[in-house]
Image: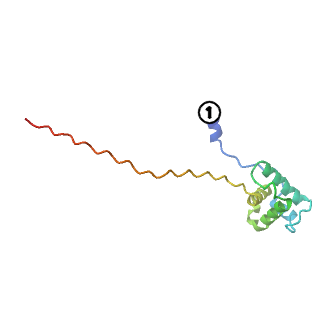
Amino acid sequence: MILALIAMIAAPVEAPVVVSSLRTEQLADACRGEDSDSTPGFCTGYILGAFDTLSMSRQICPSATSASTLEAIAATRKYLRTHRKAWDSAPAFIVRDALKGAFPCKVASKPKPKAKPATKPKAKPKAKATPKKRSA
């Protein structure tokens, strides 16, 4: 069992596998248009599929009361326009990065430890003088 654990820890971490033949340039082309356009189509379906997957796996944290289809579509379209240098990545990663930026998960802050009340240091006891021996 210990050897299996060591083997798992020592194993190289593999990059995620993307089997889609879709290129980011093709997704960006399908997503051209107004950010406010959430008309059903390939762009909207791709983004919402990624949104649902990321939300269920807690990689993004949209508000249950205010997140909307339009917000997800607009954030991704804007990201595609403004991050053209990232287009060499698979579209799934681009959409993930866009949605993580738009719907970040807040890291729970650790409560600060309560400050201990200041106490005065205890005074060191004075050493007792030892009587000197008299020589005879």
Identify the residue under disc 1. 3
Q: Observer-nearest residue: 112 or 124?
A: 124
Q: Badge 1: few (under 14), some or many (20 or more) residues near its Cα, within 10 Å?
A: few
Residue type beneath disc 1 = Leu
Percent of width and height locating residue 60: 76, 54
Pick the quarter of the image with the C terminus: top left
Q: Quadrant of residue 31?
A: bottom right
Asked whether the viewer can see residue 49, the reply is: yes
The residue shown at (86%, 66%) is: 36
Q: Residue furthest top?
A: 1
Horizontal and vertical percent position of residue 123: 35, 48
Secondary element at image label 1:
helix
Q: Is residue 96 above or below residue 79?
A: above
Residue at the left extreme, as displayed: 136
The residue at the point 84 percent across, 59 percent down is 68
- In the displayed structure, does residue 22 sit left or right of residue 109? right
Q: How many marks?
A: 1
Q: Can you tell which quarter of the image residue 35 is in? A: bottom right
Q: Is residue 97 left or right of residue 12?
A: right
What colour scheme does the image use?
A: rainbow
Q: Nearer the viewer, residue 109 or 31?
A: 109
Q: Tell me if residue 20 can be seen.
A: no
Q: Position of residue 13 (x, y in %)?
A: 67, 46
Q: Quadrant of the N terminus?
A: top right
Which residue is at a point 77% across and 58% down the rendered structure image? 99
Image coords of residue 69 (percent x, y): 85, 59
Q: 128 or 84, which is in the foreground?
A: 128
> Looking at the image, is 56 positioned above or below residue 76?
above
